[in-house]
Image (cartoon, grey):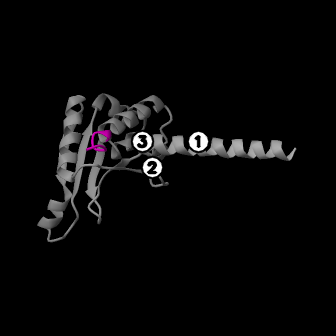
Amino acid sequence: MTRRLTTRVANFCTSLLLIFLVLSVTSTARADSDDGIVRVKSAVPMAEAITRIKADIAAKGIKFFTQIDQSKLAADAGIKLRPSTLLVFGNPPLGTQFITSNPNAGLDWPVRLLLTQDDHGDVWAVWTDFEWIARRHNIRDRTAQFEMATKVVGSITSTITTK
C-alpha cells in the first residue's frame, strides 16, 4: 500500500512539474495581474525594436496610425523620462467589431503598444490584454476576434524577442 501511494504521489508531482514547465514556456506574453497589462522583454535595443515592430505591422498589411515619443515630449516639458515610445496601429475591419459590440470599447482601439526602457536598460513591449479589454467592456460576442487580435499582437512582438 505504501509503495503504491508513493508511486501515485511521485506521478502526481511529475505531472504538476510538466504542466508548470509547459505553461512557463508557452505563456511568455500574458497579463500577470488583474490590471490587464501584458509585457514582453525585448532582446534588442529600443530603436531596433521600434523598427522591427513597424516593419512587421507593415508586412502584415495592418494600418499604422502614429508613433509618439513620450520621452521627447517629456524632455520638451523639462521632465526627464526613460525612453518610452507609444505605437498606435490596427486593422479597422477587426477592431471596429469590438466597438460595434460596445461603443465604449473605442477607448481601447486601435491597439496601443508601448515600448519602454526600465532602470536596468531592458526594453519592454507593453500592451493591454485583449481578454481583459473584453471583460472591461462586457463584450461576450466577439471571442474569435479577441483571439485573433491576441495572436496578431503576439506575432508582432515576437519579432523583438530574439537577436
Specify the label residue 18 is tagged with.
Answer: 1
User: What amino acid type is highlighted by mark number 3?
Assistant: Phe
- Name the residue located 34 percent from the left edge and 34 percent from the top edge: 152
Quarter of the rendering containing residue 56: top left
Q: How busy is the neighbourhood of tag 2: few (under 14 within 10 Å), some, or many (20 plus)? A: some
SS type, badge 3: helix
Q: Report the magenta residues as a range.
A: 158-163
Which quadrant is the C terminus positioned in? top left
Task: Identify which residue, 61 or 52, lies in the foreground.
Answer: 52
- C-alpha distance separating marks 1 and 3: 27 Å
Q: Which residue, given by chain and number where applicable, does mark 2 sit on?
A: 31
- Name the residue located 43 percent from the left edge and 33 percent from the top edge: 147
User: What amino acid type is highlighted by mark number 1?
Assistant: Leu
- C-alpha distance separating marks 1 and 2: 22 Å
Quarter of the rendering containing residue 53: top left
Q: How busy is the neighbourhood of tag 1: few (under 14 within 10 Å), some, or many (20 plus)? A: few
Asked whether 160 falls inside the magenta stretch, the response is yes
Asked whether 84 falls inside the magenta stretch, the response is no
User: What amino acid type is highlighted by mark number 2?
Assistant: Ala
Q: Which residue, given by chain and number where applicable, does mark 3 sit on?
A: 130
Task: Identify which residue, 107 or 113, lies in the foreground.
Answer: 113
Q: Is residue 92 left or right of residue 134?
A: left
Mark 1 vs 3, N-terminal side: 1
Task: Identify which residue, 53 or 113, lies in the foreground.
Answer: 53
- C-alpha distance separating marks 2 and 3: 9 Å
